[in-house]
Amino acid sequence: MDGILISSLGSVERSWTKWSQSRGIDPAYAMTLVHGRRAIETVAALRPDLDSEAELKVIEDIEIADNEELSVLPGVMDLLAELPTNRWTVVTSATVRLARVRLAQAGIPVPERLVTAESVSRGKPDPAPYLAGAAILGFAPEECVVFEDAASGTKAGRAAGCTVIATTFSHPIEQLEDAHYLIEDVTGVRAKALPGDEGVVLSFRLLED
């Protein structure tokens, strides 16, 4: 979701900075852990002495209250308009409440079923989220394409057996080594549904060296 469909990077960093400062944690260190991971696992790593469920609610409320500078990323609406609604979903580390609020605020069509932090017992980089996403769509993981922007997500997609396309929107290329392909963003990515529900063909331009 974040970094592929929308950008809420400012909100994420402001929210985690606020939470970190209130819990006696160096915000710069916290930022090295938060991206692409479930908040409950990040909280547990940063402050294992606290009640992770209670802290999850605190950080979720902070993030939902901060929707400044939320934007749809380039090429997203064009790509989604070409994808059959039963052929894509969102696999995010955000909670279901935060994910649905963020997508609605951005004007992104929300899939009927999506994978959120509550959907799995282990978050990215574990493959469980993408295995759940493939199951929702009714396809084998190796038939699925994952779009990701973070190291934990590319690792999860590769471990699940999916083809992974990473954007370089928010993270350095050297952190995306588990991706099969690199693109700048989804601008220019095209989807063509084959007749008879045979599948979808994706075309895109690789990131130039």
Image (spheres, helix red, strand yellow):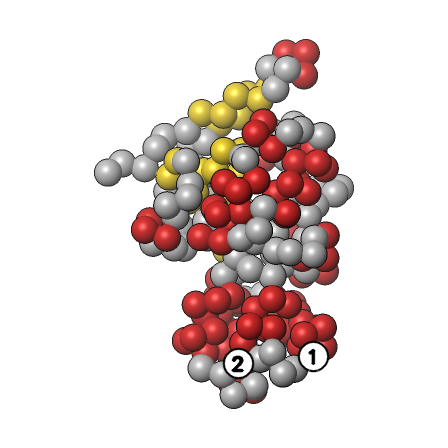
Whether residue 177 is visible: yes
Label 1, residues with CA under 10 Å away: few <14, some 14-19, many ≥20: few
Amino acid on which the number 1 mark rests in the picture: Asp
Q: Please name whichever residue, 116 or 5, is drawn nearer the observer in this view of the structure.
A: 116
Residue identifier under label 2: 20
SS assignment at label 2: helix
- Specify which label sits upstream in the sequence, 1 or 2: 2
* 14 relative position to 193: left or right: left
From this view, report whether residue 80 is shown above or below residue 121: above
The residue at the point 52 percent across, 21 percent down is 201
Q: Is residue 32 above or below residue 167?
A: below
Q: CA distance from mark 1 to mark 2?
A: 15 Å
The answer to whether residue 1 is seen in the rendering is no
In the rendered structure, are the residues bearing label 1 and label 2 in contact, judged by CB atoms less than 8 Å apart? no
Label ID, residue 51: 1
Residue 27: x, y in percent? Answer: 45, 78
Residue 169 vs 75, above or below: the answer is below
Q: Position of residue 81 (x, y in %)?
A: 59, 32
Q: Quadrant of residue 172?
A: bottom left
- Residue 144: percent from left, percent from top: 58, 31
Figure quadrant of the C terminus:
top left
* Residue drawn at 41 percent across, 29 percent down: 204
- Residue at image coords 53%, 53%: 125
Amino acid bearing label 2: Ser
Going by the image, does 63 lie left or right of 173?
A: right
Q: Pick the residue in front: 196 or 46.
A: 46
Q: Nearer the viewer, residue 45 or 95?
A: 45
